[in-house]
Image (cartoon, rainbow, N blue to C red):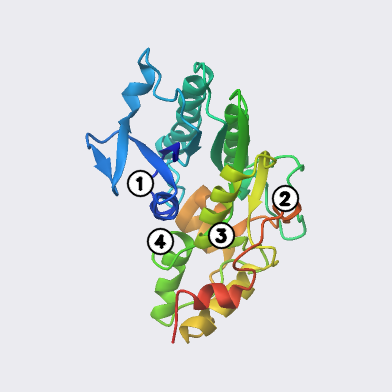
Amino acid sequence: MKQTICIAGATGFIGAHLIKHLRDDYELIIITRKKISSYMGCKTLQWEALNLSSNPFENVDAVINLCGKTILRYWTKSHKKAMYDSRINTTRYLVNAINSCENKPTCLINASAVGFFEGKEDDGPYDEDDTAGNTFLAKLCRDWEKESQEAQTRVVNLRIGLVLDKDKGFLGLLKIPFYLFQGGHLGTGLQACPWIHISDVVNIISFSLKSTEVEGPIHLVSPEKCSLKEFCSALGKSLRRPSWLHIPAFLLKYILGEMSTTLLMTPYVKQRKLLKYGYIFKYTSLEKALNSFFKH
């Protein structure tokens, strides 16, 4: 009999890849606010159902939470509140449902980000036990992880780096100027680029479901240390485009405001716990990771 997993936040690009990866081996239930009976061939559960006396998490084997408003837009005061509330309140809602179960799920796998740390060119690399930074994003990640740790079950915090997917997320945006022969690095280019291939993201989530020793924060980044300048150079080679344009930090700050910190202050983090647990990365080479998307 297949184990049952509930996934919140499955409509994002990581969620879509995760569903495809897990649906043959697990019974998946997608938690959604949309009034639909199925999503990508999986059953759905309305958020309101978590308030019912007959808790739908009873006898569910695991809960995965990927919810959160995008950080890749201008950070107005209202959007910062939405970023915070969509993560903290949703996690609290799920934790309360888990804790009210008589037969609790065996684990909660909850998203977080390497933005937990405040990235500076001369700082790091940080490991899983280092303390959070003082930026808005760092405080958000700290509170997010703290909320999830209230669950009375095994909790895994996925500190996700810059996820590489051909058409979505960080790479989906960065490749556009390269195609227009306007590619290059941002700021000094010496800031970290803690990348991870989407295949490794879903593999690590699957690994965390099966490996009961995995607990607490884990870093979802490639073991290969990489600066943004090095990443852009490799991307240019993969796309057969030059990486020549340098956008200074002051201009990014003027255009993007506080959101520019996600591009200019990315932290160097090191891979310790996942390797200790025995996870083997599919992509440790940036060249191979990029070439998996852009074949010539």
Q: Residue at x 67, y 56 (%)?
A: 279
Numbered badge on residue 11: 1
Q: Residue at x 30, y 36 (%)?
A: 44
Q: CA distance from mark 1 to mark 3?
A: 19 Å
Residue 105 visible to an observer of this rendering: yes
Would residue 296 be found to the left or right of residue 141 on screen? left
Would residue 86 be found to the left or right of residue 163 on screen? left
Q: CA distance from mark 3 to mark 4?
A: 16 Å
Q: CA distance from mark 3 to mark 2?
A: 15 Å
Q: Residue at x 26, y 41 (%)?
A: 38
Tag 4: amino acid: Lys
- Frontmost of labels 4 and 1 is 1
- Circles 2 and 4 in contact, beta carbons < 8 Å: no
Please, what secondary structure does the residue beneath circle 2 have?
Answer: helix
Q: Residues within 10 Å of mark 1 (few under 14, many from 20)?
A: some
Residue 232 visible to an observer of this rendering: no
Q: CA distance from mark 4 to mark 1?
A: 13 Å
Q: Residues within 10 Å of mark 3 (few under 14, many from 20)?
A: many
Looking at the image, residue 9 lies above or below residue 278 = above
For label 2, the residue is 277
Tag 3: amino acid: Asp
